[in-house]
Image (spheres, grey):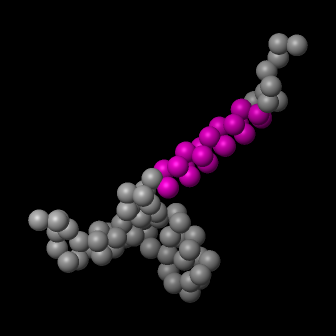
Amino acid sequence: MWGRRGGGAAGRRGSWAALRDSVSTLLSALRRVAGMPDYAAHVEHLRRCHPERAVPGEREFYEEFVRARYADGPTRCC
């Protein structure tokens, strides 16, 4: 009658996994809005569309992003 819903420990694991996935999706969307790269999405794209290309490490990926972003010098309006 007053028992928990969700099936005990297995239900809690499922809830935590769903929460983790939701937070991951939210952070990914915020990164895109802020103009930051999403490494996991890039790796997925490379594996799906360019299987012949080597997958860069996370550090190399971000270094390339920063290099491309600031290649023309500082980005300022004034």
The correct choice, above or below, for 77 with respect to 72 in the image is above
| Quarter holding residue 71 | bottom left
The correct choice, above or below, for 8 with respect to 2 in the image is below
* Residue depicted at x 48% and y 50%: 27
Q: Report the residue that reaches farthest toward the front.
A: 78
User: Residue 60 in the image: x percent, y percent?
Assistant: 37, 70
User: Residue 24 in the image: x percent, y percent?
Assistant: 54, 50
Q: Is residue 4 left or right of residue 61?
A: right
Quadrant location of the C terminus in the rendered image: bottom left
* Residue depicted at x 52% and y 49%: 26
- The secondary structure making up most of the magenta span is helix
The one of 59 and 73 positioned closer to us in this rendering? 73
The one of 33 and 12 positioned closer to us in this rendering? 33
* Residue depicted at x 65% and y 37%: 16
User: Residue 4 in the image: x percent, y percent?
Assistant: 79, 21
Quadrant location of the N terminus in the rendered image: top right
* Magenta-drawn segment: 10-29
Q: Is residue 76 left or right of residue 32?
A: left
* Residue depicted at x 38% and y 57%: 34
